[in-house]
Image: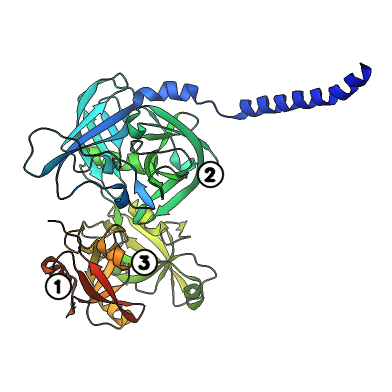
Amino acid sequence: MERMTRWFAPWLLMVVTLVSAQAAQARDLPDFTQLVKQAAPGVVNISTTSTVSASDGMYGQQDIPEIFRRFFGDQMPPMPGGPLGQGDEERKSLGSGFVIRKDGYILTNAHVVKDADEIMVRLNDRRELPAKLVGSDARTDVALLKVDANDLPTLKIGDSDSLEAGEWVAAIGSPFGFDHSVTAGIVSAINRTLPSETYVPFIQTDVAINPGNSGGPLFNLDGEVVGINSQIYTRSGGFMGLSFAVPISVAMNVADQLRTEGHVSRGWLGVVIQPVSKDLAESFGLDGTNGALVSDVSDDSPAQKAGLKAGDVILSAGGSAIDDSTALPRLIGQVAPGDKVELQVLRDGDKRQIDVTVGDWPEDTAADGSPSSKSSGDQTQLGIAISDLNEQEKQQLDLDKGALVRRVDPRGAAAAAGIQPGDVIVSFDQKPVDSADQLIDAVKKADDDRAIPVRIVREGNSLFVALRLKSDK
């Protein structure tokens, strides 16, 4: 018996130690029970109805972009509705939102309510109320709604600027229509810049997010809203461990402007910028690849009036260092039009200070500060945004004419043919392309469902691609 006791005692001690360690670890993990009880009443379900032409169709799963995708409505099939025009369909979709004022103001994503004919909000107490769209801002993906109600439960607004990677966060929303579902995780990174989303410093998390969560709140452990869940990274169409939220500081600034002014004003310099590569840094005499290289200055812009030139490297704005070129649009966008901002600029190897009176962002200006690109006709046909070559681009590319490809829709015919941003289309269907307008006209006149030879110039090399237009008839 004594021998058995000596043999059993170490094992018993090991089991007790393991159980104690697990219990201690469980105590260290956050408990979201109280957070959910307090916050859930302020989270709402949003359903929209919109009428679309049958030729527009719905995105099939094969059409959903593989990489970054807003996760609202992608998997909702078209649903029949009331009397519609011949060939029209009624589309119903679901999303999330949350109450920010007791008198009925609700925040959500702009893409949740885009093109909606009817918006319905279902509260936590199961009341369903029609909502009015006060305004939306596509650049930040923020929309403000108003319902006719008073004394609604509101959520506490937190400080997204103080978030740090590794913090616990939680989301409440309606994935696949299962309203008030709770998921939790940590902040994976802050100040993320996504493709074509240069204005928003996204919060990256590993919180499980799926279609229907879009527009819902992201909470810190104090139960305060620190973000609006907006996008996911996916190759499968579902959650893969990477989700992105609009910081609440950005969202509330937009909401306040929409409520008081009806639109959003943001600062504008009027420059086209690019990253500073290692070779460019060496050529400009920089120690590192920080800063934003000015590749073009718009005529009659605040930048031109202040004396900025192509070839300047902007190192800081308003005292904030530009570690990456994508930070400059965000910093300038936060400056009120009419206010001055001090830029530290490297020119010809010397650093200098330039004061710029910031302008109001024009509607015909792209997100990167360049002149607005022209759509190449129906996006279902070609799926690119183009513009004419400016004088500097003509010199850099050694071309007199052509249509410069600014952006490419990954679902479009151009992407399928291998056309990339930065390509210059110089001929279409064996006919020269002198301008963006000429290409748009050529696309409109082209026959569908046949391969069309397109000659492009890429990095100084000329090549042909075969492009097959998608019929939209």
Amino acid type, label 3: Ile
- Asked if residue 169 shows in the view, the reply is no
Where residue 284 appears, as percent x and y from the top left, is 47, 76
Identify the element where label 2 is drawn: loop
The quadrant where residue 23 appears: top right
Amino acid type, label 2: Ala
Nearest to the observer: residue 19 or residue 113: 19
Categorize mark 3 by other alpha carbons within 10 Å: few (<14), some (14-19), many (20+).
Answer: many
Sooner in the amino-acid sequence: mark 1 or mark 3: 3
Identify the element where label 1 is drawn: helix
Amino acid type, label 1: Gln
Sooner in the amino-acid sequence: mark 1 or mark 2: 2
Q: Nearer the viewer, mark 1 or mark 3?
A: 1
Dot 2 corresponds to which residue?
Answer: 165
In the rendering, which numbered label is found on residue 438?
1
Sooner in the amino-acid sequence: mark 2 or mark 3: 2
Give the residue drawn at x 90%, y 22%. 6
Image quadrant where one finds the C terminus: bottom left
Where residue 289 appears, as percent x and y from the top left, is 50, 67
Where residue 215 appears, as percent x and y from the top left, is 33, 37
Q: Nearer the viewer, mark 1 or mark 2?
A: 1
Measure the alpha-carbon separation of dots 1 and 2.
49 Å
Measure the alpha-carbon separation of dots 2 and 3.
28 Å
Dot 3 corresponds to which residue?
Answer: 273
Task: Identify the residue at the far top of this view.
Answer: 1
Q: Is residue 251 left or right of residue 450?
A: right
Identify the element where label 3 is drawn: strand
Would you place residue 465 above or below residue 185 in this image?
below
Categorize mark 2 by other alpha carbons within 10 Å: few (<14), some (14-19), many (20+).
Answer: few
Tags 1 and 2 in contact by the CB under 8 Å rule? no
Give the residue drawn at x 21%, y 58%. 379
